[in-house]
Image: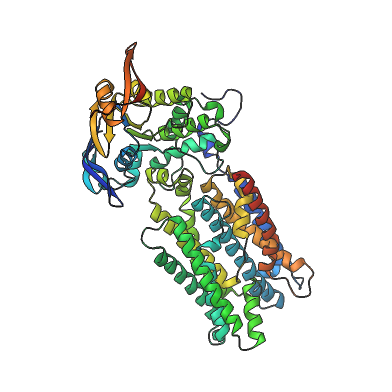
Amino acid sequence: MILEATGLSFVRDGATILHDVDFRLDPNEVVGLIGPNGAGKTTLLRCLIGLARPERGDIRLDGRSLAEWPSRARAGAMAYLAQNPDCHWPMSVERVVALGRLPHLDPWQAIAPGDIAAVERAIQATDIGHLRDRPVTCLSGGERARVLLARALAVDAPFLFADEPVAGLDPGHQIQVMGLLRRSAGRDRAAVVVLHDLTLAARHCTRLVLLAEGRVVADGPPGEVLTAPILARIYGIAARIETHDGALMVVPEGLAQVDA
Amino acid sequence: MRSILSARPSGLASFTAHDGRLLLLLGGLVAILAVLSMVIGPADVPLSALFAPGDDPTTIIMQELRLPRVLLAICVGGTLGLSGAALQGLLRNPLAEPGLVGASSAAALGAVLVLYFGLYTAFPLALPVAAIVGALLAIALVYLLAGRDPGVLTLILAGTAVSSLAGSVISLAINLSPNPHSASEIVFWLMGSLKDRSLDHFTLSLPFMAVGAALLLSSGRALDALALGEDTARTLGFSLGRVRFFLVAGTGLAVGAGVAVTGAIGFIGLVVPHLLRPFVGHQPRRLLPASLLGGMALLLAADIGVRLIPTQLELKLGVLTALVGAPFFLALVLKTRKVMA
């Protein structure tokens, strides 16, 4: 399955948030959406998943226009992990994870062994088996993030879209969540992740898409996108970019000098 | 990893073991209370008189006085509990109440206008019919006020606006009553009661309550999804506009038809879901059938209560539920405040 968007434009309150954006997602990719605040990362993600309707442009999932997909079939093909996700009722962890199976259930159909297996896989992948009977509202921030990631993984969708899944997590949990997203891609699956931490993006994504002021300014492997000149131009920072044991590291050292 | 320490039903069993036992228990409670409600009253009549042929006075008491009372308590209580649970799920707030959508006040207004103009003398069922029309108009007006594709807050504010409008016209009707008798007639009707209702009341309101209940019960999965927030619910394949319409229209139909035959009975829709929520793992979908049965049981019990509490005039049902429900609501506010602080 391939997701392909061409010529996306999005206008909100007269301000153009996205200008003519092209985006393509292939299986086995982990694409990091990066860019300064207000660059349009979240808006692009919302357009791709069908939460926002672009003014112009065409989004095709598996060759078929996104708008033509029945909403439940689309929900089974694209899972979404919201920014700061939460559950409003103190439901048990396994019941929350099981909500990920909703797109696969007909209105009065009971949950089936196949659904349970998907829930169990998601619980195992995120290592939350010991929490399964706890009310989700009583968990720590890191535990809750893993539970809600498991909820998204339980959809077992070809594509997973995560909006800043590591915001507010400590470094250990950040690495854990990114590793999970990385592992969940593959087997003909792919993920799109909105990120602010460039080193994390470089280390865990197979491809980076850099947005600035609603346009794609760079799209490629982390090594090609994260270069000192690009970072100076887009983020206005002077950054040292190092490769350590084959892994890219971005160390911001200060604001870029503006050349006259 | 599967937890090794706890001996819990594994996988499928834990998800399909629904709330059978709880629902059976509540159903049994409803049955017992219904039988009690049939045999408790000023005249000592055995239950067997209900099925006796002929027109013995005891049979008439059972079939024409007590049976409608019990049937209406079951239907009205059930829809009040169900719509409370559904609205609390939609708003993700345990303080929500079926009255919020405006249909109950509008139904009351329809009934009050019939009482004010004395229309029921021409046509006995004018009162419930006008009340149901009031409830339907309220749903339409709420949607008209809220505009295209309304958010849930806009819908509730529109419902509140319709409620206060209806309330002010009710006050006007009482204010302008030609004589004290008609004013007290309106006031007493508004207090809510199941006394002296006929089977016609039941058959008239049943279809509306049934359609309303069906709309509400069919929204369970969407309410589960909404626990994760509106965006996530949409990405799980639910159309929020449709869900909101189902819930607002379902509540309006069910509660409006209930008010039409019984007058205003408050707090059932608030209290029942709150009491039952811990027993269904706080899951909105599982709360719906439980609250349906719980509402039936609570209203049956309250209706037995008004007959057993020795007061000179029989206590009005709506007064009793408010006397018990209001302190409960207060305690709930305090508890919610603590949780949110």
Residue drawn at x 57%, y 69% is B259
B193 in relation to B78, above or below: below
The residue that appears at 70% across and 60% down in the rendered structure is: B324
| Colour approach in the figure | rainbow
**Residue B52 in view:** no
Q: Give how far across and how far down residue B85 sits, in percent.
A: 55, 54
Please say if B322 is above or below B180.
above
- Left or right? Give the position of A248 relative to B335: left
> Quick one: quadrant of the C terminus of chain B?
top right
Q: Nearer the viewer, residue B78 or A53?
A: A53
Q: Which residue is at the front of the view, B40 or B187?
A: B187
Percent position of residue A142, x then y: 51, 29
Query: Is residue B123 toward the left or the right of residue A108 in the image?
Result: right
Is residue A22 in view? yes
Identity of the residue furthest to the top in this view: A245
Residue B144 is drawn in which quadrant? bottom left
- Identify which residue is drawn at 57% across, 81% down: B173
Question: How many numbered discs sit on the rendered protein?
Answer: 0
Q: Camera-side residue: B217 or B341?
A: B341
- Percent across and percent down for residue B330 are 67, 56
Which residue is the extreme one toward the bottom? B178
Horizontal relation, residue A101 to residue A188: left or right = right
| x then y, percent, for residue A152 | 41, 35
Judge by depth and name the residue closer to the eye, B230 or A236.
Answer: A236
Q: Is residue B215 above or below residue B123?
A: above
Q: Residue furthest front?
A: A260
